[in-house]
Image (cartoon, rainbow, N blue to C red):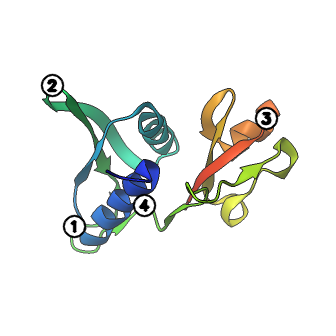
Amino acid sequence: MISDPVGDMLTRIRNGLMIGKSSVDVPKSKLKLEIARILKAEGYIEDYQVVDEAPPVSNIRITLKYYGQRRERKPVITNIERVSKPGRRIYSARTDMPRVMSGMGIAIVTTPRGVMTAQEARRQGVGGEILCYVW
């Protein structure tokens, strides 16, 4: 059993990018689907889709995004880092939402209004738990 499913998802993405895979599979959950939705909307991944391999188990197939030519291609995601962990939750008030790399990256936050970027949370005036930083 995985004690930190979101951390596992981020690690699978990070490892897939390091070895140049075209896609990675992660076990499906509502929170992971929302994180994948945000990553696609912000342009960090190509696409994601739910893949039903066996009826009780569903996976999310995340298609990773690269730039450059075939030989010299580099991943779009330079770093993806878990912030709030099961052993130590990190919360932020609406006025203290973080800016990642001076606005060059994003922070994904879970709020009472759903999962969104820190910029969107600041715009809506809500605080929440900071899940991860992506740049």
Question: Label 1: few (<14), some or many (≥20) within 10 Å?
Answer: few
Q: In the image, is residue 42 above or below residue 34?
A: below
Label 4 or label 3, whichever lies nearer to me, is 3
- Give how far apart the Cα atoms at labels 2 and 1 are: 37 Å
Using the rendered view, name the quadrant where residue 122 is placed. top right
- Quick check: marks 2 and 3 in contact, CB under 8 Å? no
* Residue placed under numbered mark 3 in the picture: 126
- Give how far apart the Cα atoms at labels 4 and 2 are: 33 Å
- Quick check: marks 3 and 1 in contact, CB under 8 Å? no
Callout 1, which amino acid? Arg
Question: Which is nearer the N-term, disc 4 or disc 1?
Answer: 1
In what element is the residue under mark 1? loop
Image x and y of residue 28, in percent: 32, 36
83 relative to 122 in the view: left or right: left
* Residue placed under numbered mark 1 in the picture: 70
Label 2 or label 3, whichever lies nearer to me, is 2
At 82% from the left edge and 34% from the top edge, which residue is drawn? Answer: 125
Image x and y of residue 119, in percent: 71, 44
Of the numbered discs in the image, which one, if any, rests on residue 107?
Answer: none
- Quick check: marks 4 and 1 in contact, CB under 8 Å? no
110 relative to 99 in the view: left or right: left
Of the numbered discs in the image, which one, if any, rests on residue 55?
Answer: 2
Label 4 or label 2, whichever lies nearer to me, is 2
Instruction: Please say whether residue 28 is visible from this viewpoint.
Output: yes
Callout 3, which amino acid? Val
Image x and y of residue 54, in percent: 12, 30
